Image: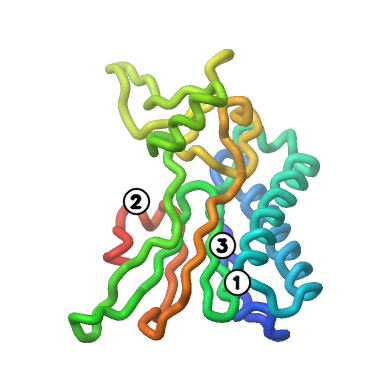
Amino acid sequence: SRDGYEASDSSDGAHNFVAGVLDGHGVAGAKVSSFVCAKISSEMKAKSKSSGRISAATVASNLTDAFAAAQKSLLRAHGADCAESGSTCVVCVREGDNLIVANVGDSRCVLGRRSNTKAHSYVAVDLSVDHKPDRPDEASRIARAGGVVEPARGLHGYAGPARVWRRIPRAGGLAVSRAFGDSQLHSAGVVAIPEIKTLGVTPNDAFVVLASDGVWDHVSSAEA
């Protein structure tokens, strides 16, 4: 399996919980997801021990720093393996009455909220937005970086999902616009900078679901 996950409860009161899911791709995808998972986990644990109870804004900043540290360490330790391999990642932290979610790629976090109108049912609230190459803001960012967004070229024209390509020399074909690793596409705009979303928890908020596209390609957020 190229997937990885991490879940932990805080014993010192700094975080209520931290959970994450990663989805590796490419020949070294399993190595990448495992390395990134361990690095982000160690970074967040170190920051929580040194900070005690912290604000949601600080958690968001810590997540951004942890993602950056993981990418830097990955390329330094396994750069040769990461040219055409990488991983997505989504991390959810509960800090007090807040959920803070950071994501890179198309692994997703969904909140299950009890319905106010129908007993024993839940409403799905997406806490992350997938980084797909044809997402308008991501496509614009890729274009500004010099990359190309288009489907793979098949025998009968274009087919399949939009992908990120390096223009010259032509290379890539990544189906997400942000990922750890995938160093050959850095010049095309593929980055490991997370998007962060913070949500205040309400009494109706019951659970979160974190999963990779292996789930979301077949099950909608509402169905999950």
In this rendering, position of residue 112 left or right of residue 67: left
Q: Which residue is mark 3?
A: 91
> Which of the two residues, 13 or 85, is positioned nearer the viewer here?
13
In this rendering, position of residue 187 left or right of residue 170: right
Q: Earlier in the sequence, mark 3 or mark 2?
A: 3
Q: Amino acid at mark 2?
A: Asp
> Which of the two residues, 41 or 134, is positioned nearer the viewer here?
134
Q: Earlier in the sequence, mark 2 or mark 1?
A: 1
Disc number for residue 217: 2
Q: Amino acid at mark 1?
A: Val
Outermost left residue: 118
Q: Is residue 103 visible?
A: yes
129 to 188, vertically: above or below: below
Disc count in the image? 3
| Residue ID at (36%, 55%) | 216
Quadrant including the C terminus: bottom left
Name which quarter of the figure residue 207 lies in: bottom left
> Do the residues bearing badges 3 and 1 touch, measured as CB atoms within 8 Å?
yes
Q: Which residue is mark 1?
A: 18
| Residue ID at (58%, 59%) | 4
Q: Earlier in the sequence, mark 3 or mark 1?
A: 1
Q: CA distance from mark 2 to mark 1?
A: 25 Å
Q: Amino acid at mark 3?
A: Val
Q: Is residue 1 visible?
A: no
How far across and down, in percent of the image, does residue 95 sit?
59, 76
